[in-house]
Amino acid sequence: MRRFIIFALILTLLLVTGIQTPALAQEDAKPLSLYTRYPAQVTEPGKTVSFSLTLNSESKEQIVTLGMKTLPEGWKATFRGAGRIIKSAYVTPDNNITIDLKLEPPANVAAGDYAFVVEAKGQGETSTLPLSLTVEEKLPPKLTLNTDLPTLKGSPTSTFRFSTTLKNEGDENLDVNLIADAPAGFTVNFKLSGKDITSLPIDANSSKSISIEAKAFGVIPAGSYPLHVLAQGGDVQTSLDLTIEIAGQPELKVSGPDGRLSGEAYAGKDSPIKVIITNNGTAAAHQIELSATSPSGWKVDFEPKTIETLAVGKQVEVTANVHPGEKAIAGDYIVSVRAKPAQGTSKSADFRITVRTSTLWGVIGIALIAVAVAVVALAVVRFGRR
């Protein structure tokens, strides 16, 4: 009896297991599936959009028919496989099929959101895939050129660097030409990453940092100078007005009376040399310090040593007391005289100084020669009679 009960239980378990196994196997089988990695996209009017679809069937081999369950009015849908237009695909459990769906909008499509539903029909199985497209109006081409500092100040020798930002605010890439309407007496260069440029490509909705460098050549009077910059790409352009402000600067000249750069001096004595300091610049010179470079053993002092103020177009005469060394021999020497203002560039000039011997020593020499001649004459007269 006990054995019979055990046998009956085992038989019941086998029957239950045998009945449920096909059902479980059927539940585990995966149906037909259709998917894409990017089901929602944004486009612009007039552009065809492509979706990459993946078709999968792990339950069985079958032929799957492809179609559009939902297609907005005026739109055209095309399925492509292996580069050809297709209407169905053969799938097997061990392979995924990749299909390209191209959606072409009507010519007058309006901006907005559009819904699509792709349908794949197999043998007793159907899979659908919703897609979404947002059509946005294309931004018209637009360029802007801006700077935080449109006015720069400096001296006539300064390099004026304007930091600007050029931005393409449209939806198209542009090749932009840069043009500068420079004021007379100035050169202008455009630089990108330290390199000189005259044009550059700029992508849609992107910007570039451009340095605009202006430098004066020759003599530029103090004042304000406008600089107009134009950026032109295709049919669009933008401009930027900049200002260069030149501050006055002294320009000194060192010379002698009537332009002479020469003088005479005596060894061991102070010899005054006249020096003319002229301001040919565009601003007054202040606190002009005078100095000199002279041969070894020489001294040069100035009266006055400092010129407090020298107005534009004016000149002043100073005295350089040149004192050659005690042992200086006769000849020509060079003394450089320098004038340096508190603000501005120092200027210098070389004076040729001729050293003369003292006339006193010449008289003494002549007297000694005369005494010597007289002594010799007396000796000849006295000893000659003997």
Image: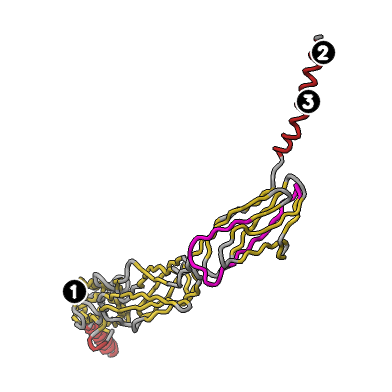
Residue at the outermost top position: 1
> Is residue 357 in view from this perspective?
no
Q: What residue is drawn where x is 67% and y is 62%?
A: 79
Whether the magenta-drawn stretch holds residue 100 is answered as: yes
Depth check: give the residue in front, 340 or 352.
Answer: 340
Whether the magenta-drawn stretch holds residue 349 is answered as: no
Residues in magenta, as a range: 92-118
Q: Which residue is mark 2?
A: 4
Q: Amino acid at mark 1?
A: Ile
Depth check: give the residue in front, 265 or 107.
Answer: 107
Image position of 35 (left or right of 341): right
Which of pointers 2 and 3 lies earlier in the amino acid sequence?
Answer: 2
Image quarter for residue 99?
bottom right
Depth check: give the residue in front, 289 or 273.
Answer: 289
Instruction: Give the CA separation, mark 2 to mark 3.
Output: 16 Å
Mark 3 lies on a secondary structure that is helix
Q: Amino acid at mark 2?
A: Phe
Depth check: give the residue in front, 121 or 221.
Answer: 121
Q: Which mark is residue 321?
A: none
List x then y, in percent, for residue 58: 73, 45
The crowd level at tag 1 (other Cα within 10 Å; few <14, some 14-19, many 20+) is many
Q: What residue is drawn where x is 81% and y is 16%?
A: 7
